[in-house]
Amino acid sequence: MTKKKAKPMKKPPIGVIPRYLWDEERLEAINDAIKQYWNAGMTPPIEWFHEREELESRYTDHIQSIIGLDFAAPTAEGSKPLFED
């Protein structure tokens, strides 16, 4: 019985950074830039706040999908919601 040599496997290309990680990095960059503007006594561009809101929403949706929580779901009688408006 002869043993066959295994062919070396080709590593796949790295690809792109996952969207949720890119969003997280972008969100951190926007928050840092906003702080720098405030510290310099300047008003940050309104677009940064809009983008931050969009990224926070998308990131929150991603985290909720991972852990299986729905913050908008009705609560059981007698229990308190996780977050109140």
Image (cartoon, rainbow, N blue to C red):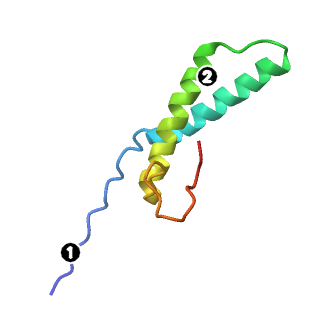
Residue 8 figure quarter: bottom left
Mark 1, other Cα within 10 Å: few <14 / some 14–19 / many ≥20? few
Task: Name the spot of residue 7 as percent of width and height, x first.
Answer: 26, 63
Residue 50 appears anywhere in the view: yes
Is 69 or 39 nearer to us in this picture?
69
Residue 51 figure quarter: top right
Residue 17 appears anywhere in the view: no
Task: Name the spot of residue 68 as percent of width and height, x first.
Answer: 43, 58
- Tell me how many marks there are: 2
Point out which mark residue 34 bears. none
Q: Is residue 65 left or right of residue 55?
A: left
Q: Is residue 36 left or right of residue 73?
A: right
On the image, numbered disc 2 is attached to which residue?
49
Residue visible at 55% across and 55% down?
Answer: 81
On the image, numbered disc 1 is attached to which residue?
4
With respect to residue 15, does 9 lie above or below?
A: below
User: Disc 2 or 1, which lies upstream in sequence?
Assistant: 1
Task: Name the spot of residue 37 as percent of width and height, x first.
Answer: 77, 18
Is 24 or 53 nearer to us in this picture?
53
**What whole-number distance in Å separates the C-alpha atoms at marks 2 and 1?**
61 Å
> Looking at numbered disc 2 in the image, what kind of residue is underneath it?
Phe
Q: Is residue 77 left or right of residue 35?
A: left
Q: Quadrant of the N terminus?
A: bottom left
SS at mark 2? helix
Task: Name the spot of residue 66 as percent of width and height, x first.
Answer: 44, 56
> Looking at numbered disc 1 in the image, what kind of residue is underneath it?
Lys
Q: Looking at the image, do the residues carrying marks 2 and 1 touch, with CB atoms under 8 Å apart?
A: no
User: In the current view of this chain or complex, which residue is farthest to the left?
Assistant: 1
With respect to residue 64, does 15 lie above or below?
A: above
Residue visible at 59% across and 36% down?
Answer: 25
